[in-house]
Amino acid sequence: MSVHYELRCRECGKTWGNVPRSFCEDCFSPLEIAYDYDSLRKLARREDLSNRAFNMWRYLELLPLPEDFAAPNAIGGTPLVASRKLAAHWGLKNLYLKNDAVCFPSLSFKDRVVGTALTAARRFGFETVGCSSTGNLANAVAAQAAQQGFDVCVFIPADLEPAKVLNTAVYGARIVRINGNYDHVNRLCAQIADRFHWGLVNVNLRPYYSEGSKTHGYEIAEQLGWTLPDNVVVPMAGGSLITKIAKAFQELVTLGWVEAKPVKFFGAQATGCSPIADAVKRNLLRFQPQKPNTIARSLAIGNPADGPFAMKLIRESGGWAEDISDPEIVAAIKLLAETEGIFTETAGGVTVGVTKKLITQNRIKPEESTVVCITGNGLKTTDAIAAEFPASEAIAPRLDAFEAYLDAQLGTTAATAKA
Ligand SMILES: *Cc1c(COP(=O)(O)O)cnc(C)c1O
Ligand SMILES: [Zn+2]
């Protein structure tokens, strides 16, 4: 397979081949991977997928992988759950949950972006890899780097959730805690990528990294029987995932794998860090950076790199963006768990809570098909909801103790039930 993709500037269109670089040196705009879709049409056929395993690498021709690529692991391939109880609760007829809370290997959609980024790191000859992270990305980098034998150095805000820090440390990664928020960490990482010959997945490898997000979108289309939904609700941190799901859908249309159809893109943020949603709601030309203050730490990016592209996509698709408060995030985490048996982290709470708000606003309608993207696992953010579930008192291992317990819990009904 000859290489059918390369870096292209999103503003001036200049091409840069395949190198570890994320900005155009002429105009300082971000680079992205551009494909030669004419040769892709000959190279990639939908029928070929039928004898490939269900994970993100089944779409290998549509990703920026080297010619000698061999799948190193089985990332992605997560369930698309057809909702019954939550759909009924909200009065929707066609509600789906794309569940990357169970993504392999580190339980968030960040496993996908690290899959393509480390492939690029290997190809460009990096021995040390790393990232700036709000938590999940560090988990994913540490896990896959351990498997593939890279040295790892990740950079995180000092006050991240303990579970997310532990989920990085366990793989033997070097963790540098920074006194500052994610935006401070990210600025430092840009300087580090310049100074050291390191592959920082969301800095100098960012164009290769973000292509991995497309596989979340390919899977949704394939799991819907090679059709596109009417609506997608996506959590936004840097604003990359939402734009890459759109790119995935567009590519499937270009290749003739799905029929063209208007899809509305809805962005979800926490009110305590909502620069993109704020700009959409106030119809601003540019978003205003914010200082994050929310329990949705994985979405707490006050100066989102792909914010302008996310805003443009949301507007042009006829979608919308919304934000919800921290108590609403907690309520939404519980609602998803109680209705669908899915335990998501705070980012998933944001997405579910915002979906509810969009339904109330009549922007999402009952008969439409709607996919809600659940991007991370609740076991990593237990601190956010622990206060809701205080431990109950322990009882003696005796029947009379249990009866007394039931009486105390239910009043006289326990005695009645027994009789
Ligand atoms: C990083 C992250 C996102 C958003 O990613 P962007 O592409 O930066 O917008 C969403 N959910 C979770 C759980 C994440 O870790
Ligand atoms: Zn340029």
Image (tube, helix red, strand yellow):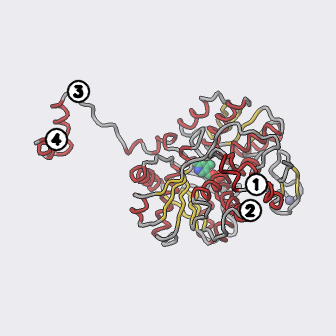
Report the number of discs.
4
**Could you tell me which secondary element the residue under label 2 belongs to?**
loop
Q: Which residue is mark 3?
A: 397
For discs 1 and 4, the disc positioned in front in the rendered view: 1
Q: Find residue 177 and report its horizontal and vertical position in percent.
A: 64, 35
For discs 1 and 3, the disc positioned in front in the rendered view: 1
Amino acid type, label 4: Asp
Amino acid type, label 1: Ala
Q: Earlier in the sequence, mark 4 or mark 3?
A: 3
Q: CA distance from mark 1 to mark 4?
A: 66 Å
Q: Residue at x 54, y 56 (%)?
A: 270
Amino acid type, label 2: Leu
For discs 4 and 2, the disc positioned in front in the rendered view: 2
Q: CA distance from mark 3 to mark 2?
A: 64 Å
Q: Earlier in the sequence, mark 1 or mark 2?
A: 1
Q: CA distance from mark 4 to mark 2?
A: 65 Å
Q: Which residue is mark 4?
A: 407
Q: Ligand 1 near label 4 (Cβ, under 8 Å)?
A: no
Do we see residue 308 in this rendering? no
**Could you tell me which secondary element the residue under label 4 belongs to?**
helix
Disc marking residue 44? 1
Q: Are marks 1 and 2 in contact (CB under 8 Å)?
A: yes
**Could you tell me which secondary element the residue under label 3 belongs to?**
loop
Q: Are marks 1 and 3 in contact (CB under 8 Å)?
A: no
Left or right: 74 in relation to 255:
left
Ligand 2 quadrant in view: bottom right
In the image, residue 204 sits, relative to residue 265, either above or below, namely above
Q: Which residue is mark 2?
A: 255
Amino acid type, label 3: Pro
Q: Earlier in the sequence, mark 1 or mark 4?
A: 1
Q: CA distance from mark 1 to mark 3?
A: 63 Å
Do we see residue 209 in this rendering? yes
